[in-house]
Image (tube, coloured by chain):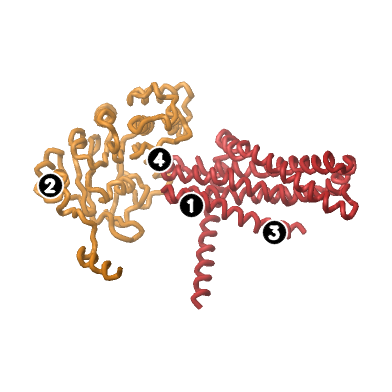
Amino acid sequence: MSYAVNGGRPVFAGLDMDIPRGRITAVMGPSGTGKTTLLRLITGQVRADLGTITVAGQELRGIRRADLYVLRRRMGMLFQNGALLTDLSVFENVAFPLREHTDLPERLIRQLVLTKLQAVGLRGAAQLMPSELSGGMSRRVALARAIVMDPEILIYDEPFVGLDPISLGVILRLIRRLNDALGITSIVVSHDVHEISTVADAVFLLSGGKVVARGTPQELQSYPSEVVRQFIGGLADGPVPFHFPAPDYFGELLARSEDA
Amino acid sequence: MKLIQELLESLAEALVGLGAVMRFLLRLVAASPRALLRVDLISQQIYNAGALSLVIIMLSGLFVGMVLGLQGFQLLQRFGSEEALGTAATIGLVKELGPVVTALLFAGRAGTALASELGLMRATDQLSAMEMMAVDPIRRVVVPRFLGGVIAMPLLAAIFSVIGIYGAQLVGVQIMGVDSGSFWSQMRGAVSLSDVNEGIVKSSIFGVTCSLIAVYQGYYAVPTAEGVGRATTRTVVTSAVFILFLDYLITAAFL
């Protein structure tokens, strides 16, 4: 699959990935490699320029909006900042997909919402507003909302960013528990090497619009590639350069002093 | 030559923008029948756009009416026809000042609130989250806000005019000593249903214009703090220009 933003610089060129059903797959890579764009492609928010993307047996190329919405009901997504609806309480946020897509009686909606909030440990926060929640709590509420329709695929966009160690541990445990208990296919986009290695079954490492490494977290530790070594080891310079492309340093300094 | 080219480019850009807004309006109209079934969402937005603007509308209406009473009295007194104050103030308010000032206030109060709310929803991924939950944000979020504004505007304009007439009466009759019977009877005799209709048509068109501009600017706001701020400013400026331009066209059409 290939994709470029508005026909400009290609984000992906010949990307080939196969995400296994029922397991936790991590998509990693340096900042700016298009991890979030990949999620947008998988969820049909943007369309690939070339090639095909197949999600749960459904080809996304040329898919009608109505069919895409049907497919999305089988998916849940956890956004980086939670993306809770700020004018609704925690309870109503989790109940939102149920109210929009089902005609379930209020009693059943209440039970379902409380069950999901209990699963993420926030049943006691049901009546709070999103503005009263911490970052970790927001993400857990968003997770409860993402699983309330019992999706087959659960997508996490940078779920560990900005979390304290306790919240981070809670989210990691939830990702593992939800995957095992519900048999969900999980896709986790992150660049947190350590956290991912504790939870993922398989890892894809992206760089330069391609998959540069794939395997288990353990296999990636000893992967024979400079890019992988730089990323796993957190080295400042390497195949992914420290400096953004620029003209010659001294040349530019001198040119400026002449201008002055 | 370069100036002409720049002018033509600006004109072409404006036409493309207008086309995009019209296409957006068609999307809203197409989604409206289903959205109308959600009475709870629409009534909430009528409350947000209408009820929450009531105080500013009523206060402004009162002061505009009082000024109209004072100015009208001074002018009519010169011709010895101060009894016609009720007619002058009412026609001025119902046909012109009521719809126009209400629309300008609406753009400043409810329009900016709509644009910034939608812009922030875009910036904080709330609209994307809805799409991911297979909920169309146009139908669920934008259309109720648009319809709420469209319904609220004529009601607000009517309230503005009524309070304005009371303000004119307060100054003209209570303070300046115009005969109360003359004030009301001349007003009833001279103001026709077509005058009221003109006011209703104007405020309805302004309602569609202001609400459309606000939700369009908010929905397509660049998802940054600066982008949301710019969308809010554009809402007020564009609404004000269109209100005054359309006011002239509608007035000419009713002559």
Q: Distance between the residues labelled 1 and 2?
A: 44 Å
> Which residue has dot 1 on it?
B230
- Is label 2 in a helix, a strand or a loop? helix
Q: How far apart are marks 2 and 4 (CA)?
A: 35 Å
Give the percent coordinates (x, y) of residue B96: 73, 51
Q: For the residue marked with disc 4, what is the amino acid?
A: Ala
Foreground of the two, A230 or A114: A230
Q: For the residue marked with disc 2, what is the amino acid?
A: Arg
Give the percent coordinates (x, y) of residue B115: 52, 46
- Is label 1 in a helix, a strand or a loop? helix
The answer to whether marks 3 and 4 mark residues whose Cβ atoms lie closer than 8 Å is: no
> Can you tell which chain is drawn orange?
A
> Which residue has dot 3 on it?
B248
Mark 3 or mark 1, earlier in chain: 1
Farthest residue toward the bottom?
Answer: B1
- Is label 3 in a helix, a strand or a loop? helix
Residue A37 relative to residue A125: left or right: left
Q: How far apart are marks 1 and 4 (CA)?
A: 24 Å
Circle nearer the viewer, 3 or 1:
1
Q: Distance between the residues labelled 3 and 4?
A: 42 Å
Q: Which residue does the image show at 37% across and 48% down from the upper left?
A: A45
Quadrant in the picture for the C terminus of chain B? bottom right
The local crowd at label 1, few if under 14, some if 14 to 19, many if 20 or more residues have their Cα within 10 Å, is some
> Which residue has dot 2 on it?
A229
> Which residue has dot 4 on it?
B129
Give the percent coordinates (x, y) of residue A151: 34, 34
Q: Which residue does the image show at 76% across and 44% down from the upper left?
A: B66
What subunit carries mark 1?
B
> Can you tell which chain is drawn red?
B
The answer to whether marks 2 and 4 mark residues whose Cβ atoms lie closer than 8 Å is: no
